[in-house]
Amino acid sequence: MTAAKLTQSSNHNLKLTSILLLHKITDNRLTGSSKRLQHVYEKVCGHEAFQIVVLGSTIWDDLGSEKKGIAREKELRKGECWGRTIRGGPDCCRLEDSVS
């Protein structure tokens, strides 16, 4: 679906300015589908496109402990998927008032 949308956008001369990749901070690891999505994005768009990615952590209000969330955020930043993506230059942000 992502590749089809990107192709459709390019056919209509629309420029992609950013892509949001979101992760629930309440989840202590990336799911298989999240990892696959990031790998597909990397293959379709190329590593140089990471500069338009924004990595967002959501559901902070449900976590109960900001300290726990900060630790999970550090793990994500250093981990396999986010770590590789961050080296490409994207921004990271917290979406603290989001709901599941």
Image (cartoon, helix red, strand yellow):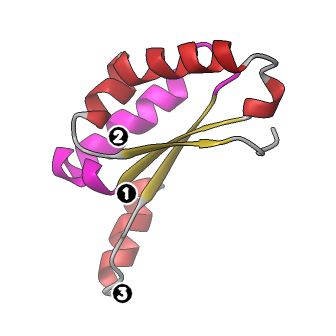
Q: Residues within 10 Å of mark 1 (few under 14, many from 20)?
A: few
Instruction: Tell whether label 1 touches label 2 (CB within 8 Å).
Output: yes
What's the mark number on residue 31? none
* Other residues around mark 3 within 10 Å, as few (<14) / some (14–19) / many (≥20): few
**Please, which residue is most extreme toward the bottom here?**
12
Q: Residue at x 32, y 25 (%)?
A: 83
Is residue 65 shown in magenta? no
Q: Which mark is residue 3?
A: 1
Indicate the secondary structure of the residue bearing disc 2. Answer: helix
Q: What is the secondary structure assignment of the residue under circle 1?
A: helix
Q: Quadrant of the C terminus?
A: top right
What residue span does the magenta drawing correspond to?
25-52
Say whether residue 14 is left or right of residue 23.
left
Q: Which residue is mark 3?
A: 12
User: For residue 57, which quarter of the picture?
Assistant: top right
Residue 87: image quadrant is top left
Q: CA distance from mark 2 to mark 1?
A: 9 Å
Q: Position of residue 63 (x, y in %)?
A: 77, 21
**What amino acid is at disc 3?**
His
**Disc 3 to disc 1: CB gap under 8 Å:** no
How many numbered marks are there? Answer: 3
Dominant secondary structure of the magenta stretch? helix
For marks 3 and 2, the one nearer the N-term is 3
What is the CA distance from the residue labelled 3 to the residue labelled 2? 22 Å
Give the class, few, some or many, for how many residues have Cα within 10 Å of label 2's Cα (few <14, many ≥20): some
Q: Residue at x 37, y 16 (%)?
A: 79
In the rendered structure, find residue 40 and report the number of the disc placed on it.
Answer: 2
Question: Where is residue 34 shown, x and y percent of the image?
Answer: 51, 31
Residue 30 visible from this viewpoint: no
What amino acid is at disc 1?
Ala
